Image (spheres, rainbow, N blue to C red):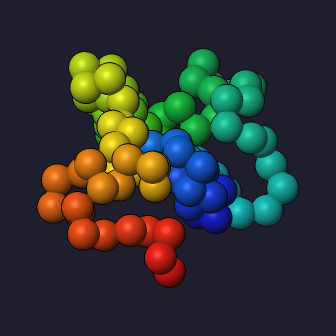
């Protein structure tokens, strides 16, 4: 949570559900993707909860990437003090006055 919040402050776009993961059993044991002797499916790959959240996360990541690409990223105007007065509805505002 803190890492995603910090990344958003330096310009990263964090789409919804970007923090999904697999917790697994509490305590020592295999990690996600480790092979299991009694199964052909690695640990965690059969978790419906994890698969659903990873699918949602992937969809949101791809969607926001497309939106940002199509729009050319975030506009500079309004995000830089030098262009503040040129922004719509902000002609009488000056972020440097505070």
> Which residue corresponds to the image point at 56% horizontal and 56% vertical from the top-left?
9
**Residue 27 figure quarter:** bottom right
Q: Residue 93, relative to residue 91: is it above or below? A: below
Which of these two is toward me, 57 or 15? Answer: 15
Q: Is residue 13 visible?
A: yes
Which of these two is toward me, 74 or 83? Answer: 83
> Which residue corresponds to the image point at 80% horizontal and 49% vertical from the top-left?
29
Residue 72 x, y percent position in the rendering? 32, 23
Q: How many marks?
A: 0
Tell which residue pokes out farthest to the left in this image.
Answer: 89
Residue 36 x, y percent position in the rendering? 71, 29
Which of these two is toward me, 65 or 29? Answer: 65
Q: Is residue 25 left or right of residue 21?
A: right
Q: Is residue 58 left or right of residue 93?
A: right
> Which residue corresponds to the image point at 24% horizontal and 69% vertical from the top-left?
92
Tell which residue pokes out farthest to the bottom in this image.
Answer: 98
Q: Is residue 65 left or right of residue 12?
A: left
Q: Is residue 62 visible?
A: no
Which of these two is toward me, 61 or 79? Answer: 79
**Residue 54 figure quarter:** top left
Q: Is residue 2 left or right of residue 63?
A: right
> Which residue corresponds to the image point at 64% horizontal and 64% vertical from the top-left?
2
| Quarter containing the N terminus | bottom right
**Residue 59 figure quarter:** top left
Residue 86 x, y percent position in the rendering? 26, 48
């Amino acid at each position: 949570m803190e890492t995603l919040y910090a990344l958003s402050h330096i310009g990263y776009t964090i789409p919804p559900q970007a923090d999904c993961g697999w917790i697994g059993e509490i305590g020592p044991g295999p990690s996600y993707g480790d092979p299991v002797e009694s199964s052909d499916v690695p640990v965690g790959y059969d978790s419906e909860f994890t698969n659903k959240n990873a699918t949602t996360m992937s969809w949101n990541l791809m969607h926001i990437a497309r939106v940002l690409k199509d729009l050319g990223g975030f506009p500079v105007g309004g995000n830089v003090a030098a262009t503040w007065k040129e922004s719509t509805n902000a002609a009488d505002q000056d972020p440097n006055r505070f």
